[in-house]
Amino acid sequence: MPKTILQLRIELQHIEPLIWRRLQVPGDCTFWDLHVAIQSAFAWNDSHLHEFRPLGRRDGTPRFGMPLDDFDENPPLHGWAHRVADVLTRDNLRLEYEYDFGDGWEHLILLEDILEAAPGKTYPRCTAGERAGPPDDCGGPDGYASLLETLANALDPDHADW
């Protein structure tokens, strides 16, 4: 029986021009597996908290991530214990993913297609995208915009450091 593959488009929000990736992940991947794939695709360090949640919902709706004792009155569900395909379906095409709550890197995840695994291919894999991801710990969208201004101005006193 062919293995199911989820084709996802991950868009980094609040950045222009858009930074995005197309990932293909096994249909049985967990939210933890997807988190790791996104970290690789954006070349981040996985040194901050994260969570997945239904689009636009921050109330009591189930979230998936890494629960920490004494951190949250309504902790997210264990990401490694829940499959993405049980939440992201043809009837529910979109999710949010937030990485680094201090910097606030918000992503839109869109289920583009459900495919059969291609013979000889290894998953997860990144098949497309545009623009390099911002460096980890650069201050979120506003800090990244400031970083780009600094890099564009050779006379800026911080230019050489960056």
Image: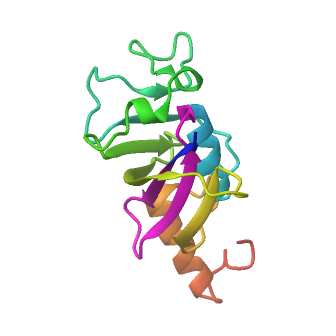
30 w.r.t. 39: above or below = above
Between 54 and 155, the one lying in front of the other is 54
Between 46 and 112, the one lying in front of the other is 112
> Percent position (x, y) of residue 25?
57, 47
Between 156 and 89, the one lying in front of the other is 89
Identify the residue shown where x is 50% and y is 70%: 146
Quadrant in the picture for the N terminus: top right
Q: Is residue 57 left or right of residue 142?
A: left
> Percent position (x, y) of residue 3?
58, 43
| Residue 134 visible in the shown view | no
Magenta-drawn stretch contains 24? yes
69 w.r.t. 115: above or below = above
Identify the residue shown where x is 47% and y is 70%: 145
Quadrant in the picture for the C terminus: bottom right
Identify the residue shown where x is 67% and y is 53%: 40
> Percent position (x, y) of residue 109?
40, 50
Highlighted magenta segment, given as a residue range: 6-31
Identify the residue shown where x is 50% and y is 29%: 83
